Image (cartoon, rainbow, N blue to C red):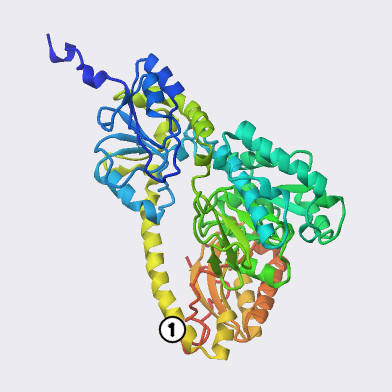
Amino acid sequence: PSDCNLPVPLQTMRRSLGVLAEAYSKWERRAPLTPSHVSRLVNSGVEVLVQPSSKRVFTDREFAAAGATITRDLSGANTIMGVKQPLNSSLLPGKNYLFFSHVIKAQPENMPLLDEVLEKKVRLIDYECIREGGGGTTPRLVAFGEFAGMSGMVNGLRGLGLRLLSLGHSTPFLSIGPTHAYTDYSTDARRALRAAGEQVARAGLPAEYSPLVVCVAGTGNVSRGALDALDSLGEVVERVAPSELARLSALAGTAGEHQHKVYVCVTGAQDFVRPARPGAAFDRAEYYANPEEYVPCFHETIAPHVSLLVPTMYWDRRFPRLLSTDQLQSLRASGNKRLLAVADLTCDVDGAVEPLVRSTTIDEPFFVYDPATRTEQADLDGPGVLMLGVDILPAELPREASAHFAQALLPFLDALATPGAPLSAELSAATIAEAGALAPAYGYIGALREARERDEESQRALSGRDAALRHHLSEAEARAVAGSTVLRLNGHLFDSGLINAALDVVEAAGGRFDLLEVTVRPNESTGREPASSLRQKSSALMQLTLDAGRAPLDAVLSQLQALAARMPLAEASVVELPEHCGGVYDRTIPGSAGGGAAAPRPPRHSTRP
């Protein structure tokens, strides 16, 4: 018989899966499969290899009883699964791996792992990217999100109690323990939350810090988990809309029924930002497609009224921050000290909430950040805002979280166990790399990594230069730096004449400008249609300086925004980018390298390509 009729060797037909022993943290006790799910797989003919682990929430004996083979050698598995990233240099060449890799934002700490994936020609599938139908924005299908919300909210309320104690007040929140101390969430942790809520109803909260408002920012899986924990407090919880927060703040410091309530406000993207173009309405699709067309407003409309801020949403650097360090500093400097704590359930360091300057651990989940001095300290008694940023919150509920996760993963396991089996659209779209190359959908990681590395190198250089400059700055030079920024102007800048009108405003105020970048998209016109029908918009990055400091700069910004509003045919927006130049404004501050007078303005009615 011909070779094609020979039976396929048994080894190549074997359906098999491997389960890693978690090495990321001593607290990582989760597993991607439970003994119950292993039993189902074994009964369906799948061999399951499990690395031994003495800290996993499920014992080796439980896995063995379910039919798993306990072994350190996973080379016989077609696909190897973990929860968090494995140790560097531990990947087996040519294998399929599933775990939360945390590389899709080109996170610097995980680039050595990605390099190893590429070098060893590993196929890396990331749970985070397994979405319904393989879409980029469809719901995630395999996630711990709700358990991050539940665990984080329990810890956040505990932290709030500790912070209030540091401020001289004993509250019912002190009776809430760390999440990992409870046998489970569904009964034990909820019982503790309900008891704390009943105590709030009876004894109340300090008038000085009432009404107590918890703001959950985001509406996804993590948000749902956090709200479940808050609702477990019982009847003391009252949901309020963002529009009601100012009314509650008017009660601050007074006695009344509001002392016996925990107010919960859920906010979404429409509460985080507003359109930069005056009079425009918020459009979710436009915001996610063109975030530069929006400016932050959360720090003005929501944050001043909040006691505990709970970020739960995805964020990356394309979007305005929820709360920057400057915004928090200004809020505290104004005398508003209502914000007591931030429980960042996304653990997005230097992210949506900039004062989360580092992650925290299950052992030491809190620190206090002082925006006045821009420093953090482990002592919870110091001035500032308490911060929580644990990056493995679901690990505090390991048994329940693992069971939920494994159940969601189960539909994908047959293909993953079978050599050569085609992957579903969901798994294909979640494949970050294979055969030594990034998948086309994730090719951007390389460019993002290079850009991040260039930015970090530039920031290091600028930091050293900036420190040297600050040491030698005169009072006048310091005012000029404070009065400097970068603006992005976007719209029909040339067709409408807005760009020249904007430069007139700057010059009339005695300012200096330099156009760092101009992108002109000319529009062909018959002369009959109005300018607003011209679809192509232009943009400009303008650095400007007002020598007298920030106050006149703010006045110019207001004039420019008013100018955009008076010229509706321009469909223009004016957005400040304060971090664009890294604090170095050598184009517009005289005496700096490259500085000097204002740059030449573009010609009137320019239509340059």
Q: Secondary structure at mark 1?
A: helix
What residue is shown at x 39% (from left), y 50% (from top)?
Answer: 444
In the image, residue 91 lies at what x, y percent?
28, 41
Find residue 506 and report its horizontal and vertical position in percent: 62, 80
Q: Which residue is mark 1?
A: 468
Q: Nearer the viewer, residue 440 or 377?
A: 377
Residue nearest the observer in this picture, 150 or 528? 150
Picture coordinates of residue 105 (x, y %)? 44, 51
Q: What residue is drawn where x is 66% and y is 54%?
A: 160
Q: Is residue 600 left or right of residue 125?
A: right
Which percent across, then down, holds residue 145? 55, 39
Residue 283 seen in render:
no
Is residue 581 at least partly visible in the picture? Answer: yes
Q: Residue furthest left?
A: 1
Looking at this view, is 133 or 493 the one in front?
Answer: 133
Up the image or down, 488 lies above or below 92; here it is below
Instruction: Say what amino acid the circle numbered 1 marks.
Output: Ala
The part of the image, by quadrant, that contains residue 416 is: top left
Please state, as top left, top right, bottom left or bottom right, where the N terminus lies in the image: top left
- Count the numbered circles shown: 1
Q: Is residue 418 above or below residue 540?
A: above
Query: Looking at the picture, does residue 43 appear above or below residue 368?
Result: above
Is 50 left or right of 496, judged from the image as shown?
A: left
The extreme top residue here reads 1
Mark 1 surroundings within 10 Å by alpha-carbon count, few (fewer than 14), some (14 through 19), many (20 or more): few
